[in-house]
């Protein structure tokens, strides 16, 4: 049963229902890999965009989704929301594993519904929003390279994985 801070986070996120998304921006992060000299941000086997933070302009106020450890010492990282700065922290292109994205493919408009899923401690694993005909999900996770050169997704990890209608936002 969620208590304290986890319950407050769930209420804040679910209260976004009925509000309007005007814009999206995020700081995309390359997949976890032993070779950071050649960062990989996209692979056909990965159905999500991996981000350090995801910002939504909701009714003229920027809101930031990111991950933090849950209330309970036994819980993993989960999705949280807070106010975001008015401007995005710029990352210089091709200088790190991070890159700025203006997510024009993500929907704008009325958030018709918001659902959250959580572990037994109340740590939020996934936020699902219906905006128009589209479903956007933000989940706590991380993409790791495997020994055979493929990729796997670990749930309840430190990045925000973004999906549009169950797929990578860029199709």
Image: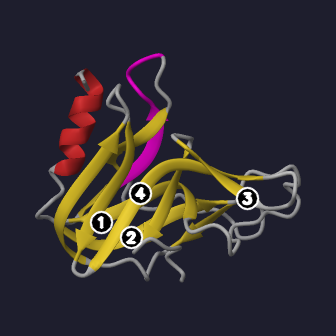
Rounded to the nearest whole Å, what is the CA distance between mark 3 and mark 2?
26 Å
Nearest to N terminus: mark 4 or mark 2: 2
Q: In the image, is residue 165 part of the stretch drawn in magenta?
A: no
Q: Residues within 10 Å of mark 4 (few under 14, many from 20)?
A: many
Nearest to N terminus: mark 1 or mark 2: 2
- Whether pointer 1 and pointer 4 mark residues with C-beta atoms closer than 8 Å, the reply is no
| Element type where label 4 sits in the image | strand
- Whether pointer 1 and pointer 2 mark residues with C-beta atoms closer than 8 Å, the reply is yes
Rounded to the nearest whole Å, what is the CA distance between mark 4 and mark 3?
19 Å
Rounded to the nearest whole Å, what is the CA distance between mark 4 and mark 2?
13 Å
**First to last magenta residue range:** 64-73
Q: Residues within 10 Å of mark 1 (few under 14, many from 20)?
A: some
| Element type where label 1 sits in the image | strand
Of residues 6 and 44, which is closer to you in this image? 44
Of residues 131 and 166, which is closer to you in this image? 166
User: Which mark, residue 24?
Assistant: 2
User: Which mark, residue 133?
Assistant: none
Q: Nearer the viewer, mark 1 or mark 4?
A: 4
Asked which colour scheme the image uses, the reply is secondary structure
Rounded to the nearest whole Å, what is the CA distance between mark 1 and mark 2?
6 Å
- Residue indicated by mark 1: 57
Report the label total: 4
Q: In the image, is residue 66 part of the stretch drawn in magenta?
A: yes
- Residue indicated by mark 4: 138
Quadrant of the snapshot with the N terminus:
top left
User: Which mark, residue 151?
Assistant: 3
Nearest to N terminus: mark 1 or mark 4: 1
Q: Residues within 10 Å of mark 2 (few under 14, many from 20)?
A: many
Q: Position of residue 48 (x, y in %)?
A: 55, 66
């Amino acid at each position: 049963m969620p208590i304290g801070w986890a319950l407050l986070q769930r209420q804040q996120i679910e209260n976004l229902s009925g509000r309007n998304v005007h814009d999206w921006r995020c700081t995309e992060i390359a997949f976890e890999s032993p070779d950071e000299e050649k960062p990989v941000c996209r692979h056909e086997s990965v159905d999500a965009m991996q981000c350090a933070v995801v910002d939504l302009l909701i009714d003229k106020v920027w809101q930031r989704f990111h991950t933090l450890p849950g209330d309970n010492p036994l819980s993993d990282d989960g999705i949280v929301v807070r106010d975001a700065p008015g401007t995005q922290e710029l990352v210089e292109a091709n200088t790190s594993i991070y890159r700025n994205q203006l997510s024009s493919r993500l929907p704008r408009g009325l958030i018709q519904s918001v659902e959250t899923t959580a572990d037994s401690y109340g740590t939020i694993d996934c936020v699902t929003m219906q905006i128009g005909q589209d479903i956007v999900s933000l989940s706590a996770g991380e993409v790791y390279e495997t020994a055979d050169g493929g990729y796997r997704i670990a749930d309840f990890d430190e990045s925000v994985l973004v999906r549009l209608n169950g797929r990578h936002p860029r199709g």
